[in-house]
Amino acid sequence: MIDLRVRSPRPVGLAALALAFLLALPLTAQVGPPVRLGPPVQTAPLAPATPSVAPPSPSAPVGRVAAPAIQVDQLRAVDVDSMGVLDDAQGGLGVDMWKGTRRAHIERLLTRLPAAPSSLVLRDLQRRLLLGVAGAPEGEGATGNAAEGQLVALRVDRLAAMGEERGLAALLDAVPARLANEPIARARIDAAWLAGDAAGACANVQRAAPGHGGAYWQKAEVFCQAAAGERAPAETGLRLLQEQRLIDDPAFGLLIEAINGNARIKIDKVARLDAMLLAMLRTAKRTVPADTARTATPGVLAALAQGAAAETNFRLAAAERAFAAGALARETLIDIYKTVSLPTDAIANAMQRAEAGDPALSQALLHRALAIQTTPAERVRLIEKAAQIARKRGNYVAAARALAPVLAELRPAPELAGFAHEAARIFYAAGQINSAHAWYELARTQAGRTPEAAQATTALWPLARLAEGDIAGPWEDGRLTAWFDVELKRDGTKAIERATTLYSLLDAVGEPVTGEAWRELLHGAERASTAMPSPALWRVFGDAAESRRVGETVLLAALSLGDLPLDQASPMLLHGLITNLRLVGLDAEARALALEAALAAGL
């Protein structure tokens, strides 16, 4: 049985019957410590869902505010680990974000940050954590000392894995030349390889390799020898690597042979595509094996999409995955869509071909059709079709972010009231709350005139409350009841599951879901198995949030969800994540995460 009692003396305001329902939910073996079920007591009201900052860019994920141009800002007379490229005004988490957290604790946890977080809101927080200007934490490092640059090196490693190219380049530029530890040297080389600059990468290898040991540097030297036409040294180096068993992927040896001129070599499989192997494939003029995208990090996926030799479908899949992970700009995705070869009549018959064709190609086709279609009604049909296909593929949020700028060209009007539901959801998913609100208001004002607008109002009300709170209008219990009644009629078997998620999200952001509403959900299963973080992680996460240790809370939030898909995250896990973000003052981000989770759940 889970202990759901709050460990702090703050009062908790959730009805006892809601507790009874959630108490009945057993967890798997990795059950965490207490989860707060009531909203935290605030000394100030929640920040509005549309903060007084620049609106999000069209390509920004849910809740993400478009960052201004990155400017290097270094703290004076402190160690290099305090360096960053985002101050508070640019989205940093505060110069004191590590206050109260020991250096060794941070170093151990940073290495475990996911390369591709399933939540774009948490990815953005993770990015801000890694790029932020902050006082270096106290204490010795994880290895028993506080070697200069160890913390910044770990940050560089995670930014590279995330494919955060722009921020990584800015941080590397800020690092003093005297600091040449291995992770930073490798990050510079890998960045050059991903950018297609093999000559620049090999120049860095030549300078840095003598000061470092290990398989990476020996393999890099052998590759660079082969790339420079030094066949004999490359063959000798390859044999030494094989004798020492330092090659963990047979593709490396095959690629050295191919670069050395063996045209008969075939590369059918790469165990794990990284920056070096991608550069080797390019140098050998070989296509990238089709199954490599499954193991590639977002940064490698972005490079594959933009320049690697690969079939159109493969480049397209890599581009969409990189975009969904936040590693590729929308403009680049649209440019790749433009390169897709289509039959001559495809765009003219986009709706029919999109319905019957490959889902990935369908998105490219529909965007191409939208680029030339000027009739509002036809544009609406194309957008609806693209959203429908994305929902079936399970990448609705990414597709919505790509569609939002096109949708922004349409203005909410009474004749488009039937489209209000989809339009608002697209803007909510893209983090453009003001635009979503305009379509919600269209549905609300037209609800008495058309049944489609009335249905849209009922369906959108929970999303509006998650995104904006009272800005969307006063809380009304009857609206929540109406939403649940519609859900029961639509799909009774899934209604309680969706309602459980929604009520947990609403409660986490401080909305007054009543005990009566929770009581209706007792008709569902009394037991449910769910994945949770380890008990140690979950308890330390709660302690960090209660003690207002901002950096540690964000770090542990990212680790708690990891790469678990949002639609598989339990209501308990989501509730804890959102509650703890609010405890450290990240109210807007907490609402954005709640909205993102609701959309992932199909609301």
Image (tube, grey):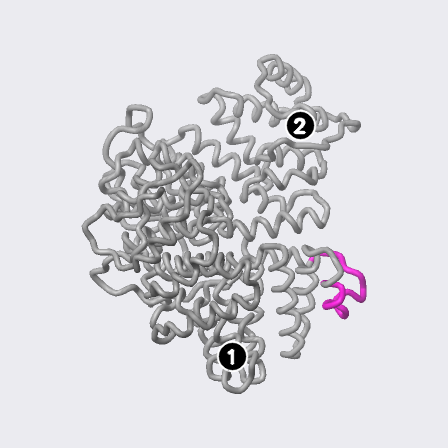
The x and y percentages for residue 550 are: 29, 47
The x and y percentages for residue 548 are: 24, 48
Q: Badge 1 is on which residue?
A: 454
Residue plotted at (53% across, 79% down) = 453
Residue plotted at (54% across, 83% down) = 413
Magenta segment boundaries in residue numbering:
339-354
Quadrant assignment, res 553: top left
The x and y percentages for residue 419 are: 57, 75
Task: Return the residue nearer the eye: 294 or 249.
Answer: 294
Query: Alpha-carbon distance for marks 2 and 1?
Result: 59 Å
Q: At label 1, which amino acid type do we have?
A: Ala
- Comes first in the chain, label 2 or label 1: 2
Tell me, yes or no, if residue 360 can be seen here: yes
Q: How many marks?
A: 2
Q: Which image quadrant: the N terminus?
A: top left
Reply yes or no: does residue 340 show up in magenta: yes
Q: Which secondary structure, mark 2? A: helix
Note whether 287 is above or below 306 in the view shown.
above
Q: At label 2, which amino acid type do we have?
A: Ala
Left or right side of 422 for 25: left
Quadrant assignment, res 418: bottom right
Main SS type for the magenta part? loop
Q: Badge 2 is on which residue?
A: 251
Reply yes or no: does residue 275 show up in magenta: no
Tell me, yes or no, if residue 74 can be seen here: no
The x and y percentages for residue 496 are: 48, 59
Task: Return the residue nearer the eye: 406 or 48.
Answer: 48
